[in-house]
Amino acid sequence: MSYGIKTFGDDGYVNLHSDYSSLVYVGEFSKETDPVRPVYEGDYAIPILDYQKNNNYDQGWLIQYTFDFDTDNLIPFYRPAFDGQELGIIDVVNEGSTWVVNALYQGNPGDFPRFFAFAPLKDLSNVTLSDSGLAVYDSDSNLVFTDSKRPLRIDDVLTVQHPSSIKTGARGSCGRNGTSCHLNYTSDQTTTYTGAVNNTNSKIYHVVPSAYGGLAFDDDGTYKRSCGFLGLGDRKYAWAYRSWSSFRGTLKHPYGTANHLTGWLGDFSGAMYQQKSGSCGYGGFLGALIGIVAVVFTGGVGLALIGGALGGFVVGELTSPTSPSLKAYESDAIFDQNSSYELIVTDATYYDIDSATGIDNTIDYDNLAFTYSANPATYWELQSMEILGDTITSSVSVYWNGAKVSEGSVIGEFSTNFTAANGDTYIRGPVEDESTVYTPGGSFVPPMVTFNDKYKVARVAYGQEPTGDAGSGDDDDDSDSNVPSDIPELYAGVAAYKAGTFSGASFWGVYTSSTNTAGTAFVIYNGQFTFLDFSNFSTGDTTSVTGSDGRTYYRGASHPEDGNPYLLNGFEYRYYGVGRE
Amino acid sequence: MSFGVAIDGFAYTYGTFSVITSGVVSTGNQTFAAKLSHPDITDWRVVFIPTGVRSPGDEEVRPVLIENSYAVYANSPSDLSPHRYIVLGR
């Protein structure tokens, strides 16, 4: 500089220089979408439940933010929602005067971080100067410093890199009985970088991690079972299994330490299982199986995602240009791990950014487990009967709490899940009980062999992943549901309730009468009354309530298929789904 | 404060970064800044901002900063996704 001004900070470095623009805080990003955790749901998919996304696939939540600001240069900072939260920026997209940030974070869906934008002061079109103070311009008459817009304060700056592997520990395996099997892909690798300033709840961070990769597993094989006359024949079976978890580089910043840990968090996962059988023969041979994953890896991931899997990222049937891109992995891989990048730390309070999270959402899932019970019957049953080596019948029955929920449906012999008419999805678990009975033939009756396999079963209740809409008239329309999208919504047992029993019932009910036109709400969850309000603390319009067990219950979707309103003894009943935190 | 700038009683004595230059990363080596042209700057950092959705399916790689005593510049791989660079200095 031939003339102008330059000053130095306590660290000995230039902190104000009339040749260079300062970086200033220009605003906070707005949350554009609800958080999502997409999984593969195409052909041969094994359902991945919420707790498996947490425990097996290490999946975080994808979310998108936007900020309208006309500049060519913008640096995003984030503030974690809680101590040690793992998160990372995936994409920064500039569309015209709108900036988009796609991010991935760990925790409950409501634990989304906040994002703040910094930009060069000289890019700002309108800056209000102080009545008194200092304004500095460069040789092109651009404003490069003013005391009314405090320059970015650097509390710490580090160069960081991600670990060279995602997981080194055992992840398990899945094989022939892997119809509901999931490996443990949870990352166990981090690299710690220690700075000079402790992390607190007011620190905000800029870093755009470069690294990404995935873990995968596949296996296949064959086996045979006896068949045909006296069981002397062989029927060959072939199976294949594949699963993966895709990861992005993330960081966490534990409070009370100056440590910054680079690590990995999943953004997309999938699991598949396929099985086929050949014909019964003596030394019978089953030809080549199974292009199991060609379905995924040639069709593109986008095709495998069911509608709504990317939540707010999806516009109609097309993925928004700013949606995060997802990848399915066939084998372990890491990309761009050896790039280093800058981690810049500053403090939100310095820019008068409040340090509140604005977040109070600690959803506790009811983990679904596979169950097997002979009484009341709760299992997945596969029966087949063969006469002289030919399969005559093969049928699947699904029982839940004593009821045959598969009534009226045809379920394939090797299906691993089934969705009932009311939207409840039943998932086949590991085989629990196998029996084979040979029946010798008589003069006029051929010999038979009968198989009866019982599997454990899990249920994902109605409404958890609805696909309908208000206009389609289908049963899984949840457009009037008040249950947060990440809470399972139950709806079952209304017919039994009408018949006078509560067993297996889970729903939100409202009844009105000529003397009680405002209505009264009640909740039955898993066969137990948790809220029965005879004192009119609620009305027919109530949509959430604290139950007698202290938990919050939400009124779910209405169910016109159950005859809402249902009239009985002068009362008018309406039935809804129910979810609870 | 023993020396420095104070405005309305607020002392600007903390460390900060200024924007030395910025632009679009293009494939191939590109010099961001020659250090001789910025004699007051002794600590250099470059922030790369991806300006489009990264496609892991395309196995995109991001630019790498290289710094020597003369300049800071990028090693921009052929499978680079769109990026901007912001050279920060103090």
Image (tube, grey):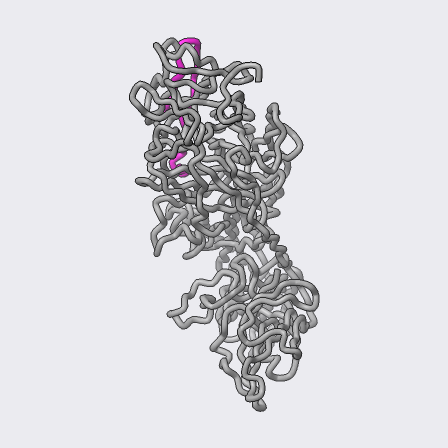
Measured from the top left, where is residue A230 in percent x and y? 61, 65
Any part of residue A292 in sight:
yes
Residue in the foreground of this view, choosing between A131 and B37: A131
- Does residue A486 sit above or below B13 in this rendering? below
Towards the viewer: A528 or A391: A528
Residue A579, above or below A47: below
Q: Which region shows up in magenta?
A: B54-77
Using the rendered view, name the quadrant where residue A451 is placed: bottom right
Tell me: A378 left or right of A69.
right
Q: Quadrant of residue A100?
A: top left
Give coordinates of residue A169: x percent, y percent: 63, 35
Query: Can you see residue A377?
Result: no
Residue B48: horizontal and vertical position, in percent?
A: 41, 28
Identity of the residue furthest to the bottom in this view: A569
The residue drawn where x is 52% and y is 43% is A244
User: In the rendered image, which quarter contains the N terminus of chain B?
Assistant: top right
A485 lies above or below A403 = above
Query: What residue is drawn where x is 49% and y is 57%?
Result: A278
* Left or right of residue A237: residue A294: left
Q: Based on the picture, tell me whether residue B71 belongs to the magenta stretch.
A: yes
